[in-house]
Amino acid sequence: MILTLIGFYDSKMPIYLLSIILMSYVGLIDDLLGDRSVTGLKGHIKSLLHLKLTTGGLKAITGLIVSLYISINLSNRIIDILVNTIVISLFTNFLNLLDLRPGRACKAFLFFSILFLIAGSGGPQLLMIVLGSVMAFLPLDLKGKIMLGDTGSNILGLTLGISSVLLFNFNVRLIIMIFLILVHFVTEKYSLTKIIEGNRFLNFLDMIGRGRD
């Protein structure tokens, strides 16, 4: 609304807003009603194959549909639609995987946002808007007074996914896609928290502003 008032109009903004609302809504359902007996993307897919819809499965299906919807509206070629859909959906889930400790997902969002703003080219308005919100949110998140949950982490991941599509060419998006696929393969076998805690540098970054548990 503010951007429109100052004369900037992005015809795609309603698409972003609708997508963010949908993903935050299914995240809220998972936060409030989620069954933690089924974990991981692989676990939810197995449940779906057995015709059992978990809240995580609902989130995965919605994420895929939303990612495809965004990609169709932003892409011209079939290969672009495919790559962009994978990048957006996996980025959304990646931030969800990180949100297991105070401030972790927000720090990752800040890191990728700064990297995207430095290396990317194009309109970063959506990324800048969410980045401002995260900077205001982070101090309370680090202290454990409030938390993102799936509701918030879905928004951050979706924003990074959309920003990847808007700011980078096909080759860079291909690299991002491969990185996200590898991350998801690793996290299906190993605990991301244990990986971070077992690496001195990653653990140092993870603990900044948080102190010891």
Image (cartoon, rainbow, N blue to C red):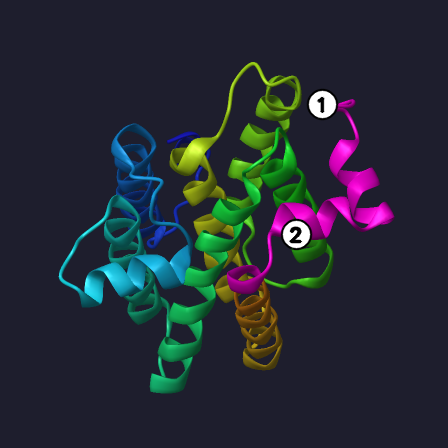
Which residue is found at the position 62% from the left and 76% from the top? 175
Distance between mark 2 and mark 1 Cα atoms: 26 Å
Q: Which residues are magenta?
A: 187-213
Foreground pick, 145 / 69: 145
Q: Name the residue that disc number 2 marks.
A: 112
Q: Position of residue 188 (x, y in %)?
A: 51, 62
Q: Let me know if residue 103 appears in the view.
A: yes
Location of the C terminus (image quadrant): top right
Q: Which mark is residue 84?
A: none
Q: Position of residue 43 (x, y in %)?
A: 35, 59
Q: Main secondary structure of the magenta part?
A: helix
Left or right, residue 96 beside residue 110: left
Reply above or below: 58 against 142.
below
Q: Secondary structure at mark 2?
A: helix
Q: Nearer the viewer, residue 119 or 188?
A: 188
Q: Residue at x 79, y 30 (%)?
A: 208
Q: Which of these two is toward me, 3 or 57?
A: 57
Q: Secondary structure at mark 1?
A: loop
The quadrant holding residue 77 is: bottom left
In the rendered image, which quarter contains the N terminus?
Answer: top left
Identity, as a three-letter code, of the amino acid under mark 2: Phe
Comparing labels 2 and 1, the label whose residue is closer to the camera: 1
Q: Earlier in the sequence, mark 2 or mark 1?
A: 2
- Across and down, in percent, residue 9 comes to 39, 46
Q: What residue sits right under mark 1 in the picture?
A: 213
* Identity of the residue drawn at 38% across and 63% down: 42
Q: Position of residue 10 (x, y in %)?
A: 39, 50
